[in-house]
Amino acid sequence: MERYLKKHVLSDIRQKIIIITGPRQCGKTTFSKHLFPSYDYFNYDAAEDRLRLQKKVWDRQKPLLIFDEIHKMPQWKRWLKGIYDTEGLSPPIIVTGSAKLNTYRKVGDSLAGRYFQFRLHPLDLKEAYHLWQPNPEEIFKRLFACSGFPEPFLHDNEIYYKRWRRTHLDIILRQDLIDLTSIRDIQGIETLVLLLKDRVGGCVSYANLARDLERDANTVKRWLQLLEELYVIFRVTPYHKKINRALLKEPKYYFYDIAQVEDKGARLENLVACALLKELHFIEDTTGEKMGLHFVRTKDGKEIDFVILKNTKPIYLIEIKWASNTPADAFKYFRTYFPDAQQIQLVRELARETSYPSGVRICNLVNWLVNFNL
């Protein structure tokens, strides 16, 4: 598979260290190994590789050097900075990891000015279609049942996915989390994940979660932050600028592994959230533009599922429906606050696409996600 980031990484690889982050098993290592016909590869989880890295012993004649999970090394940024400052990019360096760069707080000197970061996401409708160009409906069904993580997606078997899912989350919570933090209350975090699955698409109250978990709210917030840093979930915050009675604090949480969400309506919204976030990260990482993904909701229940910002300016209002060819009432209310934003209602089961004088477009969800560019 020639992943969507390939040409952009190759364009930058001789100018900066390339850091590729993203969910565990989304294809970061495989992607890196397929950039050049040969490479020297080190995984910090392997004891032998750790010893060689400490001595800085590798094949400098190879066209590429890959450091995997090196963020687990104490003072890894200082170590990497030293290599860059003394040897440059001979050979080019790729660093991959399933934890965000800010997972470690005590990492020594900054790499500022020495790297470009790319966030690799699981497959979505747009990427899968352009890789294989089969029937978009078939891609949707496979994503919906097996998620966009390459291994279960390519197997296209729901039972295989469910078996993969158990080990995938178990590795994150019982290996990565313990490696990165001093937290040992794994059962509490597992329960938090289960609670979040039932709250996808809804505003999350930290106080309610704390009560359900019998923990304090600060503990719950810290656990949520860790799950974000490990790419299990991502947060979408409310947009409230100059909107009367808008919610200010309660966010929504979505999963990178969409197929584990049980309710089909919530799973559909989660699928769209993943596709939008992937596109926004792509734009940020390749152009430097500042993008934002939010939702908007008033205290009396008027809501639009997603508001997309470009350089702080709202450019899209997006509402998700399983089956409805009638524009959501919320468009009428919010268009006065977002007069320049495109109004899109994405519908899973839609007989005919339409548009209205108000500016609302009713679009087939699958077709729009296959072709959209923000």
Image (cartoon, helix red, strand yellow):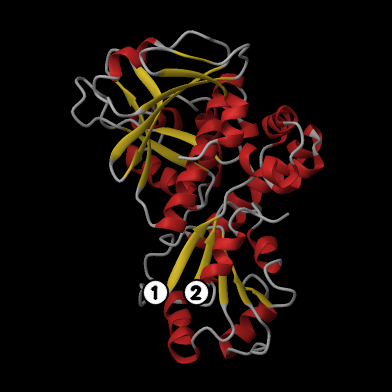
- Quadrant placement of the N terminus: bottom right
Residue at image mark 1: 111
In front: 23, or 283?
Answer: 283
For mark 1, give the secondary structure: loop
Name which residue lies at 54% across and 31% down. Answer: 272
Residue 50: % across, % down: 62, 80
Residue drawn at the location 50% of the way across and 34% of the way down: 273
Q: Is residue 338 above or below residue 93?
A: above
- The secondary element bearing badge 2 is classed as strand
- Between 312 and 267, the one lying in front of the other is 312
Q: Can you tell which quarter of the image residue 291 is in?
A: top left
Give the percent coordinates (x, y) of residue 250. Answer: 33, 30
Residue 340 showing in the rendered view: yes
Say left or right for 160 vs 181: right
In the image, residue 269 sits, relative to residue 81, either above or below, namely above
Does 41 sit left or right of 20 as displayed? right
- Classify residue 222 as left or right of residue 134: left
Horizontal side of 140 relative to 308 (left or right) equals: right
Whether tag 1 and tag 2 are in contact, CB under 8 A, the answer is: yes
Q: Position of residue 29 (x, y in %)?
A: 66, 63
Indicate which label's residue lies in the foreground, 1 or 2: 2
